[in-house]
Amino acid sequence: MKIAVVHSFYTAGKPSGENALVRDQVRALGAAGHTVELFAAHTDELARDPLYPLRAAARVASGRGNSPLARLREFAPDVVHVHNLFPNFGRSWVRHWVGPLVATLHNYRPMCAAATLYRAGAVCTSCPDGDPWASLRYGCYRGSRAATLPLAWAGRHGPARDPLLARADRIVVNSGLSERTYRRAGVPAERLMLVPNFVDAPQSDETPGHDTGRWLVAGRLSAEKGVLELLRQWPAHEPLDVVGGGELLADCRAAAPSSVRFLGQLDRAELCRRMASWRGLIFPSRWYEVQPCVQIEALAAGLPTLAFEGSSVADSVREHGTGLVTQWSKPLAPVVAEAATRFPSLRDHCRQVYADHFTERSWITRIARAYEEATRVAGNHVEVPT
């Protein structure tokens, strides 16, 4: 099968799990015997233009500009798989593509200017619930009303009328929570397909199941990730390692008890190599999440997860029995103590859950089904004149 993958890459200045996922999936499709070509736009290259902010804002608001359509027609793929168009591709070109088209939703941007459905310390669904200008009032994108305006205008009709989602033959979501959220926002259920992400099994130099007694939290130190709130409640006698950086680093350091170490940024390979040495993954995220790679990497390493209620990770932990789920209103020390008792017996089970659900082979099987279904229904499309 000839597959065209379309993706607008975020800046390399900020670590992007989405960028890494796209690269991994392109490689996996090629390894499975498909002919794959990546049609990419790179923020780091385009941003050299002094007028880039204005061009990007106009492109987002209007949906027009920077189309891969001509190159796609030259490549003549059997299916087009779109990951991200923001902010470097237009959206209107999808109406002119008559072949099978699949879109993957890595975040909530079609219904939320911030892409997180999170504001002021809590989940916020004001825009998809019928107040599409709420994001503009609050300046949800980068804390700026001016920066938010193009996104608010583009999303004013809701995700069901987003040009890409309205056109896509199949829409891939990575978690049950993401699927339910988009269904509630009006995206037709029959076009949504649940295809969890995959990661490569880590090559650890630790003895399988080895536990150094330290807990791990890994991620961006920003408000929606909940690390600051976790550290404010973290039991002073429990050793914890924090991997990552971000705008709340100084606040996190100030809030942390002496048992907490800050390891800074670790590249993905190094984090995976060391994963099995921790006692368990703590996942305190306060937004819905979609499907973070770190939890799958933990499963592959046999690392159970202590998650806080409300995220897709909490749902996954509960569904697969790979750890514990708690609430912010509960005292944390007894929960951590319970996790320390139960987690050693879950390590083999975590590895088995990874092998059953989150390997590259599992993803290839599921995404192939999405391509097949998109191909089956694509014959109804009529080309829109350019």
Image (spheres, helix red, strand yellow):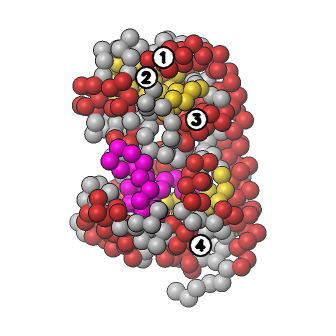
Asked whether 341 or 300 is in front, the reply is 341
Where is mark 4, residue-wise?
167
Marks 2/1: CA–CA distance: 7 Å
Question: Any magenta on residue 48?
Answer: no
Asked whether 299 or 180 is in front, the reply is 180
- Label 3 or label 1, whichever comes before in sequence order: 3
For badge 2, the amino acid type reads Pro
Marks 4/3: CA–CA distance: 31 Å
Q: What residue is rendered at 57% in x and 72% in y? A: 166
For badge 4, the amino acid type reads Arg
Question: Any magenta on residue 112?
Answer: yes
Left or right of residue 137: residue 241: right
Marks 3/1: CA–CA distance: 26 Å
For badge 1, the amino acid type reads Pro
Where is mark 2, residue-wise?
331
Q: Residue 334 bears which disc, if any?
A: 1
